[in-house]
Image: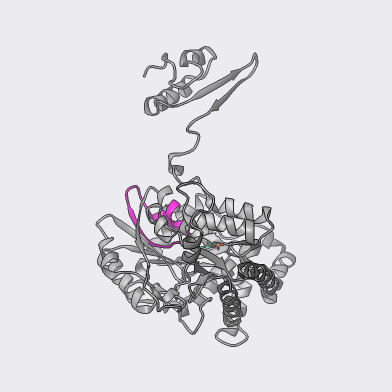
Amino acid sequence: MHPSESVKYGVISIQKIWKHGIAHTWGTWLYAQLEEHTTFDLRVMSSSSTLGLTMATRLQARRLDGIDHNPWVECTKMASEYDAVNLGQGFPDFPPPDFALQAFQLALSSDFMLNQYTKAFGYPPLTKILASFFGKLLGQEIDPLKNVLVTVGAYGALFTAFQALVDEGDEVIIIEPFFDCYEPMTLMAGGHPVFVTLKPSPTQDGELDSASNWQLDPTELASKFTSRTKALILNTPNNPVGKVFSKAELELVANLCQQHDVICITDEVYQWLVYDGYQHTSIASLPGMWERTLTIGSAGKSFSATGWKVGWVLGPDSLVKHLRTVHQNSIYHCPTQGQAAVAQSFQHEQLHYGQPSSYFVQFPQAMQRCRDHMIRSLQSVGLKPVIPQGSYFFIADISDFKKKMPDLPGDEDEPYDRRFVKWMIKNKGLAAIPASIFYSRPHQKHFDHYIRFCFVKDESTLQAMDEKLQKWKEELRP
Ligand SMILES: Cc1ncc(COP(=O)(O)O)c(C=O)c1O
């Protein structure tokens, strides 16, 4: 196409732009765009003194294609519109522990230099304590300067890792159901997500399912590794099922990563939240794995302070150095006071480690009680929770509802769980999250009979939930 021709959907021709005296370089750039995208739409509002330009199509970068719809927004909006008890979103509605709050207050009121930038890759007392705390757990000598990067929450760590390591055309293996940002983060980096599904094994009649029954098929997993596989993303304890991967399962993943020379990105933000005596194992602690693993953590999840948004990545310098490059060219510094508060909170935990006074011991005990309360209550209306081994979450089976009321309102191709959640918010005053959003598109329909609940909730929220469920139970009486 020559610049003198009209733009396909445009309002003016390039010749007119030339008449308005637009710089030649801009014209050359525009010409290049027109060559590539024939649907480039250009509207010019010209007045005697100003020339305003609105490009109506293709403002967004191509990397956003297909990832701009977010089903969370709709559920959250509806939950507040109907004033529903929100059991969907993953954050505590109770305060962080006193020692953590005091640490933040101290960070605000003590050294005024904590109001200023700190070291780009992490406030030194924080990188130091993270290195010593996790060094013991992972059985590694961790260098605070080379093996630790502090990020804006675990989200920041994940984004930095994908940007630093995943290239155009690289394949990333994602175990589904997965924390929903893994897929768009892979796509934004130019990678191809390759999904492998945790499959539930059948339960005895009347027995509740458990997250431990949701397993990877070793042959299927092995078949996903190709010469293009760059990374595998693991999440244990897992969101949304609450599965804690066993050592044997992690060994399977580790062996395949080593065999195919693949990086493992492991999201362990719920590592302290394990129940019923299950043990969390970090894959980086397995033989031969430290060198190829990035371990991601979150102070938000560790200290019930999700708004602090302090996260970290631990790993070998050979990997972390590339994350530092992304970090220094994007975020550069994370807020200093939050980091100081987290450093102090870890000091507290190091002193109390493994003792009844430790938050990492007390918190899971308290949350196991919340989990059991919610599981008991939801069963009273016919929801069938899958008992989680860890995390903030569990999913509940709604197949019986799907059989009894298959025609809930909604778009024709809308997975059932989304229609069910909207129905539940409107009619029962309870909000959850449809589990299909944690699956790749082709698999959503196969898992649209589950919804996700968050049980990390205050006693008053659980009571409010019980009141709603009591009403629902009465309506069920013949
Ligand atoms: C599995 C998982 N990873 C990472 C995050 C993000 O953590 P942060 O709040 O520290 O960014 C979440 C938050 O819900 C999560 O569930």
Q: Is residue 136 left or right of residue 122?
A: left
Is residue 251 among the parts visible in the rendering?
yes
Q: Is residue 363 above or below residue 293?
A: below
Q: Residue furthest bottom?
A: 355
Q: Position of residue 372 (x, y in %)?
A: 57, 79
Colour mode of the rendering: one colour
Q: How many marks?
A: 0
The stretch in magenta equals 161-184
Q: Is residue 14 left or right of residue 350?
A: left
In the rendered image, which quarter contains the N terminus? top left
**Which residue is more in the foreground, 198 or 1?**
198
Residue 408 falls within the magenta-colored stretch: no
Residue 172 falls within the magenta-colored stretch: yes
**Which residue is more in the foreground, 446 or 26?**
446
Q: Position of residue 317 (x, y in %)?
A: 40, 64
Q: Residue furthest front?
A: 478
